[in-house]
Image: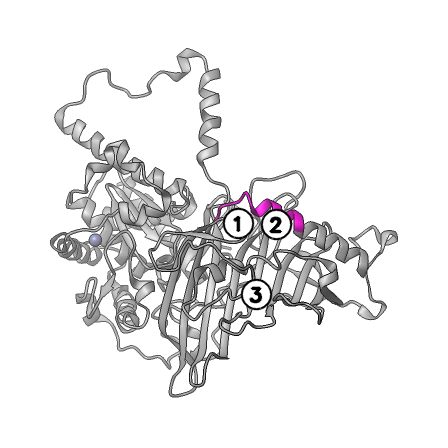
Amino acid sequence: MPMVRYGSRLLVFLMVCIFAAVAQNTSSSPAPSAAKDDPASGRAQSAEGTASAALTLNDVIDRVVQREHYFMAQMRHMHPLVETYLQDLKDDSSGNPIPVKDQYFLGRLDMFDGPEDVSFVGQPGFGQRMLAKLTGVYSLHYLPLGFAQMVVLDNDFQKRYYKFNFVRREFLGEVRCLVIDVQPREDQKVARFLGRIWVEDQDYNIVRFNGTYSPQPRINFFFHFDSWRLNMRPGTWLPAYVYTEESNLKTGLTKTLHFKAQTRLWGYDLKALSKSEEFTQILVDSPESVRDQSDTTADATPVVAERMWEKQAEENATERLERIGLLAPPGDVDRLLVTVVNNLLITNNIDLQSDFHCRVLLTAPLESFTIGHTIVISRGLLDVLPDEASLAMVLAHEVSHIVLGHRFDTKLAFNDKLFFPDEESFRRLDFKRSSADEEAADTKALELLKNSPYKDKLGNAGLFLKALQQKAPDLQKLIRPHLGNSLAGGKDVRMASLLASAPALDEKRLDQIAALPLGGRIKVDPWTDQVELSKAKPVALASAREKMEFEITPFFPYLTRLSAGGADKVALTTSSPSNDSTPK
Ligand SMILES: [Zn+2]
């Protein structure tokens, strides 16, 4: 049967290309290597081929300050989503820090009057206007605003406030940078940036800064951070990642802060604009080409009408989620997920007539759910799943809802139901299932898995569930879903019968990978929201400490520069995306 052959070919393709490549935990490209350069002269050379136009450090700083003011002006019109995921750490018996508690913030950045955010997850302190810029930004309650602040070097960056010291030249990815140490002058009353900046040597944009703000205020605390910008439009570098870490910040006589946090920004280019372009296109079309494309001229039968109604609710929900930057636009990762679902369906002789879709939710908390016939799986969950069998387990549960014909609330077929502010999305959009539906889907999923190509690897899936069950009490915010059902709650875990077939968890064993760190598999293009699989090569683990299951790590993006010709693509990874995925 042609369908089976099709399925198995894709299965091989998927196993070889995807999971083999990312089964190990590396969340980043190699650290940037230092380029040889002689700082002794105190002069920084300008871009290649223009050696005659060598600039003094003073000239460079003038340009950097100018570019930073331009950056601030641009940021006032940008409203990206900002997500911060934080893990509180505690040393275990062997002295290794392990996460014992976590925090999650998601909001939209508004810098019109300094960094401010509008929250998607309700918590006190959100959305409040900052009274004094750069003073007392962070409280012990980890104000999300504090993390958003770290995309800005200084709200009022002026040369006269700082001392600058040229260190060397260095490549970050393929972008050559001038590395400059920056210190506030002694007479500064306001807290200012203290640390190191990396300036790309063509337009003198700051592409990375690493340090803290100084002096420390009396009541609150400035954290240390490593803030990265990516070249998203020709000549425009915008904030994408901030890593924060404190290992021994004394906040009182007895209290010490010990945590790490990742802040990610995306959703810079919102789709609302492209819709009006589409409208212009329709107006210039000839009347023949805009005829309705449906192939029937009759009214819908009751069954078809019901299906169309559900489809309308489904499309309204997915379009809304995409438009506000929570759902990635359709892309390659979706197609890989569809392949895994097809592997399950074909081997079980189920024909859904291709009437299902897979999409990626761009947020970190581990969740999956269905909206009608659309299976949605979060970036965080895709990141931590250790292998294809565990992915198949998650997808088997979701496709079971579709196979079993579980209903979903079609109220979203009424368009007025979608008229609510973006930040209420988590409250207004709810795709939770009843516990009866959940149990039925679990049972069906096990049945699908037992007939599938994954049947001999379910031990790994069980191992993932065991690790999840073990970490669930400490990582409640990571495991708490915002739109669907929880993978694990209390002592319960989804598809618990798989636990029995799993080997015992052994944290010391290097060859037992129950879950991966966050951020290792999925790359998000912060401008377009497109997702792709990370091209970073897996590395051998040196010790069990490097397993870092469900943990966050620092960022080391491979920086690339967009050509002035202006490709729409944001360069994020080592090589340009290629359709040639055949293994060598
Ligand atoms: Zn479910």
Q: Residue 322: horizontal and vertical position, in percent?
A: 38, 42
Q: Is residue 410 left or right of residue 93?
A: left
Q: Mark 2 vs mark 1: which is more N-terminal?
A: 2
- Residues at badges 2 and 1 in contact (C-beta under 8 Å)? yes
Q: Which residue is mark 2?
A: 72
Residue shown at 15% from the left, 46% from the top: 404
Q: Residues within 10 Å of mark 1 (few under 14, many from 20)?
A: many
Q: Which residue is mark 3?
A: 226
Figure quadrant of residue 515: bottom left
- Determine whether the beta carbon of the residue marked 2 sits less than 8 angstroms from the nearest atom of ligand 1: no
- The alpha-carbon separation of the residues under discs 2 and 3 comes to 18 Å
Residue shown at 24% from the left, 18% from the top: 296
- Residues at badges 2 and 3 in contact (C-beta under 8 Å)? no
Q: Is residue 580 left or right of residue 325?
A: right
Q: Assign the N terminus to one quadrant of the image.
A: top left
Q: Residue 53: horizontal and vertical position, in percent?
A: 86, 52
Q: Residues within 10 Å of mark 3 (few under 14, many from 20)?
A: many
Q: Which residue is mark 1?
A: 111
Q: Amino acid at mark 2?
A: Met
Q: Which residues are magenta?
A: 69-80
- The answer, for residue 21, to whether it is visible in the render is yes
Q: Amino acid at mark 3?
A: Asp
